[in-house]
Protein backbone atom coordinates (compact mmCIF):
# COMPACT_ATOMS: atom_id res chain seq x y z
CA UNK A 1 0.00 0.00 0.00
CA UNK A 2 1.48 3.33 -1.08
CA UNK A 3 -0.10 5.61 1.53
CA UNK A 4 -2.91 5.67 4.03
CA UNK A 5 -6.16 7.50 3.36
CA UNK A 6 -6.90 7.76 7.08
CA UNK A 7 -8.42 11.19 7.86
CA UNK A 8 -9.57 11.56 4.24
CA UNK A 9 -12.97 11.79 2.60
CA UNK A 10 -14.16 9.24 0.09
CA UNK A 11 -16.53 11.03 -2.24
CA UNK A 12 -18.84 8.79 -4.24
CA UNK A 13 -18.65 9.36 -7.97
CA UNK A 14 -22.01 10.05 -9.64
CA UNK A 15 -21.75 6.64 -11.33
CA UNK A 16 -21.67 4.79 -7.98
CA UNK A 17 -25.23 3.46 -7.78
CA UNK A 18 -24.77 1.27 -4.70
CA UNK A 19 -27.78 1.54 -2.39
CA UNK A 20 -25.67 2.46 0.62
CA UNK A 21 -23.11 4.73 -1.02
CA UNK A 22 -24.98 6.69 -3.71
CA UNK A 23 -23.83 10.36 -3.43
CA UNK A 24 -22.17 9.60 -0.11
CA UNK A 25 -19.20 11.08 1.70
CA UNK A 26 -17.28 8.66 3.91
CA UNK A 27 -14.85 9.89 6.54
CA UNK A 28 -12.07 7.30 6.76
CA UNK A 29 -11.18 6.53 10.38
CA UNK A 30 -8.73 3.74 9.53
CA UNK A 31 -6.90 2.64 6.40
CA UNK A 32 -3.94 0.29 6.26
CA UNK A 33 -2.81 -2.87 4.50
CA UNK A 34 -5.52 -4.86 6.33
CA UNK A 35 -8.41 -2.76 5.00
CA UNK A 36 -10.35 0.39 5.76
CA UNK A 37 -13.13 1.60 8.04
CA UNK A 38 -15.12 4.81 7.89
CA UNK A 39 -18.39 6.58 8.59
CA UNK A 40 -20.83 7.90 6.03
CA UNK A 41 -21.26 11.51 7.17
CA UNK A 42 -24.10 12.68 4.97
CA UNK A 43 -26.94 10.21 5.59
CA UNK A 44 -29.17 11.47 8.41
CA UNK A 45 -31.79 9.02 9.64
CA UNK A 46 -35.26 9.72 10.98
CA UNK A 47 -33.97 8.91 14.50
CA UNK A 48 -33.04 11.84 16.74
CA UNK A 49 -30.29 11.78 19.34
CA UNK A 50 -33.01 12.05 21.99
CA UNK A 51 -34.83 8.97 20.64
CA UNK A 52 -31.62 6.93 20.51
CA UNK A 53 -30.64 7.86 24.06
CA UNK A 54 -34.12 7.06 25.36
CA UNK A 55 -34.03 3.70 23.53
CA UNK A 56 -30.78 2.72 25.27
CA UNK A 57 -31.98 4.02 28.66
CA UNK A 58 -29.77 7.10 28.84
CA UNK A 59 -31.31 10.26 30.27
CA UNK A 60 -31.64 12.97 27.64
CA UNK A 61 -32.43 16.27 29.27
CA UNK A 62 -30.71 18.48 26.66
CA UNK A 63 -33.33 20.12 24.44
CA UNK A 64 -31.08 20.23 21.36
CA UNK A 65 -31.00 16.41 21.26
CA UNK A 66 -34.59 16.36 19.99
CA UNK A 67 -33.59 18.05 16.72
CA UNK A 68 -30.25 16.43 15.88
CA UNK A 69 -30.49 13.32 13.70
CA UNK A 70 -28.45 10.17 14.07
CA UNK A 71 -26.48 9.35 10.92
CA UNK A 72 -26.48 6.09 9.01
CA UNK A 73 -22.75 5.40 9.30
CA UNK A 74 -22.71 2.40 6.98
CA UNK A 75 -24.05 -1.07 6.36
CA UNK A 76 -21.73 -2.94 8.76
CA UNK A 77 -22.96 -3.58 12.33
CA UNK A 78 -25.86 -1.12 12.10
CA UNK A 79 -26.55 -1.41 15.83
CA UNK A 80 -23.06 -0.15 16.76
CA UNK A 81 -23.09 3.48 17.80
CA UNK A 82 -20.08 5.68 17.17
CA UNK A 83 -19.38 9.31 17.98
CA UNK A 84 -17.00 11.29 15.79
CA UNK A 85 -15.93 14.36 17.77
CA UNK A 86 -13.26 16.97 18.39
CA UNK A 87 -12.88 16.77 22.17
CA UNK A 88 -9.89 14.95 23.64
CA UNK A 89 -11.64 14.23 26.95
CA UNK A 90 -10.64 10.80 28.24
CA UNK A 91 -13.67 8.70 27.26
CA UNK A 92 -13.62 4.95 27.99
CA UNK A 93 -13.18 3.87 24.34
CA UNK A 94 -11.72 6.61 22.16
CA UNK A 95 -9.40 6.39 19.19
CA UNK A 96 -7.44 9.44 18.10
CA UNK A 97 -7.78 9.66 14.33
CA UNK A 98 -6.08 12.99 13.63
CA UNK A 99 -5.19 16.21 15.41
CA UNK A 100 -8.31 17.12 17.40
CA UNK A 101 -10.49 14.38 15.87
CA UNK A 102 -11.56 11.26 17.75
CA UNK A 103 -13.89 8.29 17.42
CA UNK A 104 -15.57 7.05 20.59
CA UNK A 105 -17.71 3.92 20.95
CA UNK A 106 -18.42 3.86 24.69
CA UNK A 107 -21.67 4.94 26.34
CA UNK A 108 -19.98 7.39 28.73
CA UNK A 109 -19.85 9.98 25.95
CA UNK A 110 -23.55 9.43 25.22
CA UNK A 111 -24.40 10.09 28.88
CA UNK A 112 -22.57 13.41 28.66
CA UNK A 113 -24.35 14.26 25.39
CA UNK A 114 -27.68 13.40 27.05
CA UNK A 115 -27.03 16.11 29.62
CA UNK A 116 -25.80 18.60 27.02
CA UNK A 117 -22.21 18.58 28.25
CA UNK A 118 -20.51 16.32 25.71
CA UNK A 119 -18.23 17.53 22.93
CA UNK A 120 -19.59 20.57 21.12
CA UNK A 121 -18.66 19.27 17.67
CA UNK A 122 -19.87 15.73 17.15
CA UNK A 123 -21.66 13.36 14.82
CA UNK A 124 -23.38 10.24 16.11
CA UNK A 125 -23.70 7.36 13.69
CA UNK A 126 -25.11 3.85 13.73
CA UNK A 127 -23.11 1.37 11.70
CA UNK A 128 -19.98 1.88 9.66
CA UNK A 129 -18.48 1.18 6.25
CA UNK A 130 -15.72 -1.38 5.94
CA UNK A 131 -13.41 -2.71 3.24
CA UNK A 132 -11.16 -5.77 3.24
CA UNK A 133 -7.48 -5.55 2.28
CA UNK A 134 -7.17 -4.15 -1.24
CA UNK A 135 -10.92 -3.74 -1.74
CA UNK A 136 -11.02 0.05 -1.34
CA UNK A 137 -7.96 0.48 -3.54
CA UNK A 138 -9.71 -1.53 -6.27
CA UNK A 139 -12.88 0.57 -5.96
CA UNK A 140 -10.80 3.75 -6.28
CA UNK A 141 -9.06 2.28 -9.34
CA UNK A 142 -12.50 1.43 -10.77
CA UNK A 143 -13.42 5.14 -10.54
CA UNK A 144 -16.02 4.68 -7.77
CA UNK A 145 -14.49 7.24 -5.40
CA UNK A 146 -12.65 10.53 -5.31
CA UNK A 147 -10.39 11.09 -2.32
CA UNK A 148 -9.35 14.26 -0.54
CA UNK A 149 -7.96 15.15 2.87
CA UNK A 150 -10.84 15.77 5.26
CA UNK A 151 -12.00 19.17 6.43
CA UNK A 152 -13.45 19.55 9.93
CA UNK A 153 -15.77 22.35 8.86
CA UNK A 154 -17.46 20.02 6.37
CA UNK A 155 -17.82 17.33 9.02
CA UNK A 156 -19.23 19.56 11.75
CA UNK A 157 -20.48 22.80 10.20
CA UNK A 158 -21.86 21.90 6.77
CA UNK A 159 -25.45 20.60 6.58
CA UNK A 160 -25.53 16.88 5.74
CA UNK A 161 -27.30 17.39 2.41
CA UNK A 162 -24.47 19.74 1.26
CA UNK A 163 -21.48 17.60 2.29
CA UNK A 164 -21.17 15.62 -0.98
CA UNK A 165 -20.77 18.74 -3.10
CA UNK A 166 -18.70 20.55 -0.44
CA UNK A 167 -16.23 17.66 -0.15
CA UNK A 168 -15.80 17.51 -3.94
CA UNK A 169 -15.29 21.29 -4.01
CA UNK A 170 -12.13 20.73 -1.91
CA UNK A 171 -10.70 19.24 -5.12
CA UNK A 172 -11.98 22.13 -7.22
CA UNK A 173 -14.67 19.88 -8.70
CA UNK A 174 -18.37 20.55 -9.20
CA UNK A 175 -19.38 16.93 -8.79
CA UNK A 176 -22.83 17.54 -10.27
CA UNK A 177 -21.14 18.25 -13.62
CA UNK A 178 -19.18 14.97 -13.73
CA UNK A 179 -20.37 12.30 -16.11
CA UNK A 180 -21.67 9.07 -14.67
CA UNK A 181 -19.79 7.22 -17.42
CA UNK A 182 -16.23 6.23 -16.50
CA UNK A 183 -13.35 5.54 -18.81
CA UNK A 184 -9.66 4.76 -18.55
CA UNK A 185 -6.99 6.05 -20.91
Image (cartoon, grey):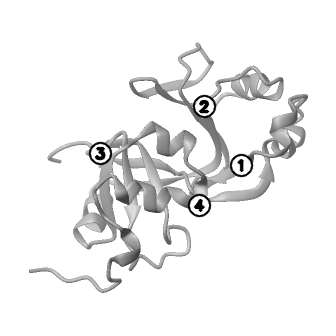
State which tag comes first along the sequence, 1 or 4: 1
* Residue 29 circle label: none
Residue under label 3: 5
Mark 4 neighbour class, 10 Å CA radius: few under 14, some 14 to 19, many 20 or more: some
Q: Residue 103: x percent and y percent?
A: 53, 32
Query: What element does badge 4 sit on?
Result: helix
Q: Residue 62: x percent and y percent?
A: 86, 29
Q: In this rendering, which labeled residue sits more in front, label 1 or label 2?
A: 2
Are the two marked residues, 1 and 2, in contact with CB atoms closer than 8 angstroms?
no
Give the Cα separation between the discs numbered 3 and 2.
Answer: 22 Å
Give the Cα separation between the discs numbered 4 and 2.
Answer: 18 Å
Q: Residue 12: x percent and y percent?
A: 41, 66
Residue 76 seen in render = no
* Residue 121 circle label: 2
Residue under label 1: 70
In this rendering, is residue 27 above or below 65?
below
Name the side, left or right, on which 34 lies relative to 130: left
Name the side, left or right, on which 32 lies relative to 102: left
Q: In this rendering, which labeled residue sits more in front, label 3 or label 2?
A: 2
State which tag comes first along the sequence, 3 or 2: 3
Look at 64% across and 46% down and name the residue there.
125
Residue under label 4: 161
Query: What element does badge 2 sit on?
Result: loop
Amino acid sequence: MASSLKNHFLIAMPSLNDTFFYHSVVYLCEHDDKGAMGLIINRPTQISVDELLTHINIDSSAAQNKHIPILFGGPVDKSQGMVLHDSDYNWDASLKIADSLYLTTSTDILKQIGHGIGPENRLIALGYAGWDAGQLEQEISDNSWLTVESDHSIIFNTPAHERWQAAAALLGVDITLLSSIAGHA
